[in-house]
Image (cartoon, rainbow, N blue to C red):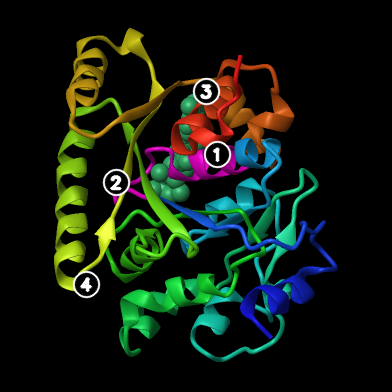
Amino acid sequence: MDAHTRNRGVFTSVWAGTEGKVRPVRIYAIANQKGGVGKTADTVNLSAALSARGRNVLALDWDPQGHLTEALGIEPAEDATLAKALLGKWSGELGELVRRTAGGLFVIPTSDEMFLLETDLHALRMREWILSKFLDNLVGVFDDVVIDCPPSLGLLNDNALVAARRRKDDEGPQGRIVIPVQAEDSSLRALRLFLRQVATLQEELKIELDIAGLVVNMYDGRKGRIATSTLEAFEKHPLDLLAVFKDKKEVREAWRLRTTVFEHAPESETTEGFRALVGRLDPELAVVA
Ligand SMILES: Nc1ncnc2c1ncn2[C@@H]1O[C@H](COP(=O)(O)OP(=O)(O)OP(=O)(O)O)[C@@H](O)[C@H]1O
Ligand SMILES: [Mg+2]
């Protein structure tokens, strides 16, 4: 039985189904070692935007802080956990790891073991490739996997970047990295550090990492020259500036209500921005006006 057929069986209880063709999975790592720049908010709302375009989306909470799990109002996992599955300590059906939100997103939540996972991964062979190998099992199940990365440059982050690498084989999952930033000087410095880590990983692991671009979050031009000049620097940066999201209360409100802006404020500027972001990331999904 091939992986596609097997996985379809696993998910029949939670998954609406497709026409039986293997579609390339797209994997997005939402990554930046700088804390509080909007990684989780972007993961939640990009996932919702992709889902609104009819995609089967898996949002993966890859940050031990568990903010994605919390933001989507899901209980942390207890028995069937991703951490156990990755360490070979659990071998049930993949579907048991996955929850579904009322809004239709599939989510792999955090668990308490996530805090120890990084240390445990260090002991494994091919330790940077563990998440990638796990996600290969999802071929044919989801269209998009969006990974909420932790605010550090450790092994968890490396695993997410490797999972989101560019593959030579067109049929395999295709990955891209999205870097959330804030319009502050410290964000520019953090970006340089992040890009250095990307270069190191490419060199050491002989992989190709495709950075889709930058997403500026919580932009507030009223903050003056610091904000506007940093935004200018991002505009001039060789990486694409994919989107600028203003500091908007609907983003915080949606989080507090344990939902996405697509459900909380469907007609807002923020949802419009995330729809456009989907088109930038995957032109086949661009909405033609
Ligand atoms: N466009 C926005 N407008 C208003 N608030 C926002 C916006 N984007 C994110 N936020 C808020 O900013 C805070 C930090 O965002 P978030 O938790 O997504 O950052 P993070 O990079 O994931 O942080 P960490 O590094 O701790 O994981 C959250 O309270 C979130 O709701
Ligand atoms: Mg976060």
Q: Which residues are magenta?
A: 31-47
- In magenta stretch: residue 33: yes
Q: Locate the C terminus by quadrant.
A: top right
User: Who comes first in sequence, dot 4 or dot 2?
Assistant: 2
Task: Please state the horizontal and vertical placement of residue 46, each as a whole percent of the image.
Answer: 55, 39
Secondary structure beneath label 3: helix
C-alpha span from label 2 to label 1: 19 Å
User: Who comes first in sequence, dot 4 or dot 3?
Assistant: 4
In the image, is residue 271 above or below residue 87? above
C-alpha span from label 3 to label 1: 10 Å
**What residue does disc 2 label?**
34
User: Which amino acid, by three-letter code, is at mark 1?
Assistant: Leu
Task: Please state the horizontal and vertical placement of residue 178, each as a whole percent of the image.
Answer: 38, 43
User: Who comes first in sequence, dot 1 or dot 4?
Assistant: 1
C-alpha span from label 4 to label 3: 35 Å
**What residue does disc 3 label?**
273
Q: Nearer the viewer, residue 34 or 279?
A: 279
User: Which amino acid, by three-letter code, is at mark 4?
Assistant: Leu
Secondary structure beneath label 2: loop
User: Which amino acid, by three-letter code, is at mark 3?
Assistant: Gly
User: Who comes first in sequence, dot 3 or dot 2?
Assistant: 2
